[in-house]
Image: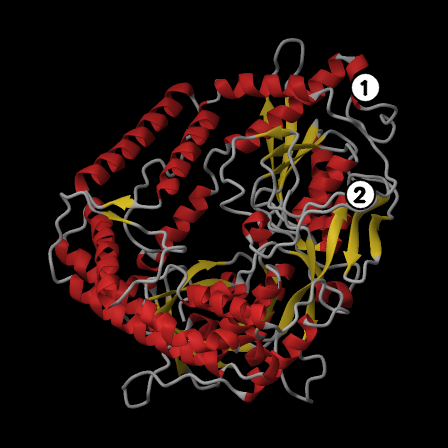
Amino acid sequence: MNRRFAVPLSLFAALVLATPLALLARADGGSPLAITPNADQSTVSKMVYGALSDSRLAYRPRPGDQALSEDIFRRYLEALDPNRQFFTAADIARFEPYRDVMGDAVRQGDPAAAFAMFGVYRERVDQRVAHARKLLKQDFDFTGDERWEYDREKAPWAADNAALDALWRKSVMNDVLRLRLAGKEPAEIRKTLDKRYQQLGRSVAELKSEDVFSLFLNAYTASVDPHTDYLNPRSAENFNQSMSLSLEGIGAQLQRQDDVVVIREIIPGGPAAMDGTLKAGDRIVGVGQGRTGAIEDVIGWRIDDVVAKIRGTKGTQVKLEYIPAENGIDGEHRTVTLTRQRVQLAEQAAKSKTYTIPAHGDMPARLIGVIELPTFYQDFEGRRRNGNDYTSATRDVARLLGEFKDKGVDGVVLDLRNNGGGSLDEAVQLTGLFIDQGPVVQQRESGGRVQVYADRSPGVAWDGPLAVVVNRASASASEIFAGAMQDYGRALIIGETTFGKGTVQNLLDLDRWPAAGEGPRYGQVKLTIAQFFRADGGSTQNKGVVPDIAYPLSVDANEFGESTYDNALPWTRIAAVPHARYGNFAPLLPQLQKMHEARIADDLEFQWWSEDVAHYRAEAAKKYLSLNEAERRAERERQETQRKERQAIRKQKGLALDPLADETDDGLTANERDVVKDAEREKAAEKRPDPLQREAAAILANAIDLLEQDRPLSAQVLPGTQSAVRWAD
């Protein structure tokens, strides 16, 4: 399976606990059943250990020694209780015998120790939930100088239950205070929080054997390296769908609220949209297969179990029993039958917009096109079936570049902020849209063999001025592309230093030889197989790609990025490979920097963004919140006043208005809000002013102007390459 990825973060273990999950309760209504491992999990554990300890497969195999056992033990505890708010020091002492056996547990396929630890964890969650609900019956004093220390990742474990009680009292106080500040009445506050804490208990009670096993095995994979993950069959399916930007189903985005799955959004072009019956806010209470299949009641089910029932093979039918949004939870039930189709997830596809940069001095106005690329996606299966028609980031960007040519844009900005990577092939092919053949990235495998991935297609899709915008969350495939553009002198790199992930992962299918008629049983392992290096020989590992024009840091390297992982590979270098050099922007940068600084000094939106980032970082550095109502209310009023003043200035100066200027903290979590309104708010957020993107367009326009009006400078920046790259005509 040749699916090579450059994806930055190991999210899959976290998703298990983050996703609202179906009640795993006794049939007699008693306590939840004990969760135990099964034979398939034993097989998977042995297979994954075999793969990650094999130097022919894993880039940095790790032996099953004492250090590995201790590392797995620590990471599994972090996965269960990352903020140290459930276990006590006595619990950790009770687990101590497991510290030395975790490596053997993986190798021998016996995760019983991990399941035993989870059993204690579930008991502790129940105890904490009961205590939190009990605290809601009392009144709190918000006039003192207490504060809630919310970051306990490195704090000592609580000495005993009394110490945990004290921690939870402050946590509940903060929850109550947030709702008080949002204007909620005491009775409403108690009701909201009582339901919230009950849901916390249910979400843990609903975890299944495969969830616990995934947490444990991912504690092992994370001990090998930060970007190696185990994906159970369902996680693997979701990962592949996210990469292909498509799925086979009805085309509806679902969200669980209380015990019911609610439609958050109807996806345009899908079966639900084409039928027109269902709408956002409708509650799905039953699912049946085919027109005549019996409908199963799905109230109280995990959302992923409901989704699994609704999704299915293209051309098959699914019958849904639902309650219309306007009817309320006890309203009339209706049914609709839909035929499943392949649904394109267009929200994550490449998008374009344009900015007109005003004329100044003797220079004309510039039309700058911007392409936002959220991920380097590719439909691997579609490409295998039909090499001429498949979903691809490169194909979509090429189409948008063609549209820009028709519009006569002067330059193009590729926005890769928050693009965490994706397909390595797409990173190489996308680079080929802007260079005329040549090496893009080098890949060194575990044995030391170096392979060069190159653009071998003659010609380019865009030979004009180009800039790339990145931030700390731009990772992996984004860094390959940005690094190649920098090595070739093909584009200005603008923004923040990137994530710093310089490793390549491959999906190893553990169901390579399934029995006839049998679906996936074992899942997949995404393992690190190589390290990538830029054409100039340097790695992006840990260091990332450093921009030519830097924006203020939104986050420090010690807070987010590859450098925060304790077992990340170090930075290193290999030999460079010969490659073209279209330009050298160094002589241009001082003037661009000066023009940039002058412009943002008068750019209110950019200045406001810088102020907000500085304020956020200062607050985050404290790692606590005051529990004094007067202090918190004063800060809330300051923020509200600031938003209103900024919106008034926007109106006065004719600037684009902020659609979320009136938004305030409502104290609620995502699944407590009105689903439809929350989705509308999410859409409105996409329309907020983006001063960083607009400034990148202005920087590119400045570069075009400088090169056009200063031919000696142009010859110095772009020596002898005008025939290949049209930066200045």
Q: Residues within 10 Å of mark 1 (few under 14, many from 20)?
A: some
Q: Is residue 460 above or below residue 261?
A: above
Q: With 56 as the anchor, is 229 left or right in this view?
A: left
Tell which of 421 and 390 is nearer to you: 421
Q: Position of residue 152 (x, y in %)?
A: 36, 55
Q: Cα distance, mark 1 to mark 2? A: 22 Å
Tell which of 616 and 357 is nearer to you: 616
Q: Is residue 277 visible?
A: no
Q: Amino acid at mark 2?
A: Ala
**Which quarter of the figure is the N terminus placed in?**
bottom right
The image quarter containing residue 30 is bottom left
Q: Residue at x 73, y 35 (%)?
A: 486
Q: Is residue 43 above or below residue 94?
A: below
Q: Position of residue 263 (x, y in %)?
A: 41, 63
Choose mark 1 or mark 2, whichever is in front: 2
The image quarter containing residue 592 is top right
Q: Position of residue 232 (x, y in %)?
A: 57, 74
| Numbered label tally | 2
**Which quarter of the figure is the C terminus placed in?**
top right
Q: Residue at x 64, y 75 (%)?
A: 48
Q: How is the image coloured?
A: secondary structure
> Are circles 1 and 2 on residues that touch, CB within 8 Å?
no
**Secondary structure of the residue carrying numbered label 2:** loop
Name the residue tied to disc 1.
716
Q: With 704 as the anchor, is 370 left or right in this view?
A: left
Q: Position of residue 444 (x, y in %)?
A: 78, 55
Q: Is residue 697 visible?
A: yes
Q: Is residue 458 above or below residue 134?
A: above
Name the residue tied to disc 2.
535
